Amino acid sequence: MASAGASAQSEGQAVLTRQLTKRYGSRLALDGLDLEVGHGEVFGFLGPNGAGKTTFVKLLLGLGRPSSGTGQLLGRRLGDRSARAQVGYLPELFRYQGWLRAREVLTLHCRLGGLPEAGFPEEVGRSLELVGLAGRGEDQVATFSKGMQQRLGLAVALLGSPRLVVLDEPTSALDPVGRHDVRELIRRLRQEGVTVFLNSHLLSEVELLCDRVAVVDRGRVLAQGALADLLSGEGPRVRCRDLPGDGLPGFGALRRDGEWVSIPGLDSSRTPELVAAIVAAGGRVYQVDEGRQSLEDRFLQLLERA
Amino acid sequence: MNWRPVEIIAGLTAQELLRRRLVHALLLLTALVLALTGWGFSRIPHLHLGGELLTPQLAKLAAAQLLLLVMFMFSFVVGLTAAFLAAPAVAGELESGVALAVLARPISRAEYLLGRWLGLALPLLAYVALSASVEFWLVAVGTGYAPPDPVGAEAALAGQGLVLLTLTLALSTRLSAMTSGVVAVVVFGAMWVAGVAGAFGSAFHNTAISAVGTVSHLLVPSDGLWRAAVYEIQPKLFASASLSRVGSPFSATSGATPAYLVFAGGWVLLVLALAVLSLHWREV
């Protein structure tokens, strides 16, 4: 399914899609989605409910078929068996065999994942420990709370040291402690060089964790890039009085908006220099706005524009 | 096709039957039925007719008639059990989301479905073999009557179970668990009624009605296999014209031909292949 061009480009990509489209009858769930996720990145996939986030994840893992377009997962076509062997997946709808014990669910996934049988007990114990379920391995899954089932789902996703971990709303059922634990877990995965594809609409979570993000709505990518670039906004602004002239030495032409002045295109890292130049020119500074947007502001702005 | 995932899913499916205590319940109830029918059969040689003890010949004939009734009940148990087991086996996991995590693993849809089928089919076959063998033994001990071909009868009954199991599993790749089960049971009943109608048609030499039975036996071979089982259970005497031309579902004029058995086997394989294709193209 993937083109030769996509194959050549994907060598450095954990996930690559080109014009990925999915239709359900007359409804367009994904509309020509182009996405790239590099190896070792923590990638945030953001969007409102019904934006197509889960549909995209299912296409990546071969749980659904694209209507058109191409894609690759770990350098192989979407849904490829050997690629899936290297992926850990926590579905949004996390349900496991309630009649099994937690340890048995994990052993089942060790078997399905083709891990060496001799290492099962150690691997199961390690993943239970990682998600805070050590000591609960012998409990029947049906007795678990929703949060504990989500932790179990995380443990399933972490089995066998996957190269890519796909987490679809991984903290939806967790309490604040659980959310903190998941954040720590994702940071740990990043340190180990594991690629994390985080599908979420919890913006604060994504802002804290992700290197790069894509914002999607109605099946289209509205913006994609490094988080810092996406949130850079329109540069720093300074509210000041008594500043003479229309320019500043070393900065060029000033833009004025009442008491607010700014330099078009100025990087927020130069904010202290700008303040110093204004003061040196005789201006009295009352307020400084670094100009960096919050992810929530940027997200809402992108959705409004769309 | 990799057999390891098939084995894993088959083992998981069989384990589920045990853990959910379905095997325990079925075996306990079957043991009760076997005990009751065994006691009943053992009383037949002690029955009187016109103040005289039944002759051994009459006792065997009575035992054969009653055995057909008991096996008819078993055939319904096997058919309905197959439908109830298979209906949620795939549809239930798709509806609940359990299948998401499993199918994201390196396993093909064909391996998953075949694993589910084997995990249900093998326990069902074991149940048929065990329960029917014990029933035949009890009848033989109690009355002296032994079916002409008990193994053939068990194979036909097991085949009927496999037909229903495979049909329901195929339906459950597209329909909900509840709908799959209901549709399969209705088809089972309809084929049985069509088989009875066909037998009546044959008895009264009505070609059109007779064709209903023939078509039903080709469409879904559940009743065709039941009649094959009946032929192997009943005394050869029953197959004679005078006793079998009543269109009864408890008698058969002839056994299944080898061609029909091959057809039934092919039918199961074809429906299983369709189920695999159906699941393969389905969105999860």
Image (spheres, coloured by chain):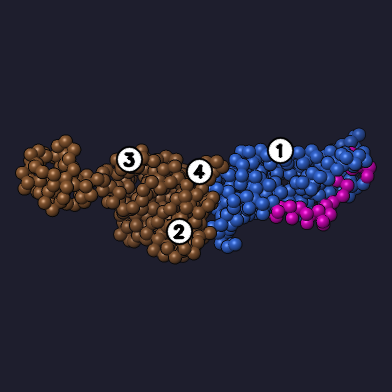
Chain colours: A brown, B blue
Of the pair B157 and A13, the residue shown nearer to us = A13
Q: Which residues are magenta?
A: B241-270
Compared with A31, A304 (above or below) is above
**Which disc number belongs to residue A28?**
4
**What residue sits 58% from the left and 48% below the top?**
B282
Q: Mark 3 and mark 2: span between their CA atoms?
A: 31 Å
Q: Are marks 3 and 4 on the same chain?
A: yes
User: Subunit of mark 4?
Assistant: A
User: Subunit of mark 1?
Assistant: B
User: Subunit of mark 2?
Assistant: A
Of the pair B3 and A118, the residue shown nearer to us = B3
Asked which secondary structure carries label 3, the reply is helix
Q: Mark 4 and mark 2: span between their CA atoms?
A: 23 Å
Q: Mark 1 and mark 3: span between their CA atoms?
A: 56 Å
**Which disc number belongs to residue A73?**
2
Q: Are marks 1 and 4 on the same chain?
A: no
Whether pointer 2 and pointer 1 mark residues with C-beta atoms closer than 8 Å, the reply is no
The amino acid on which the numbered mark 2 sits, given as a three-letter code, is Leu
What residue would you read off at disc 1? B186
Whether pointer 1 and pointer 4 mark residues with C-beta atoms closer than 8 Å, the reply is no
Q: Nearer the viewer, mark 2 or mark 1?
A: 2
Residue B189 place in picture, x, y as percent: 74, 39
Farthest residue toward the top?
A: B50
Asked which secondary structure carries label 1, the reply is helix
Q: Nearer the viewer, mark 1 or mark 4?
A: 4
Residue B104 visible from this viewpoint: no
Residue A244 place in picture, x, y as percent: 8, 42
Asked which secondary structure carries label 2, the reply is strand
Residue A197 place in picture, x, y as percent: 39, 53
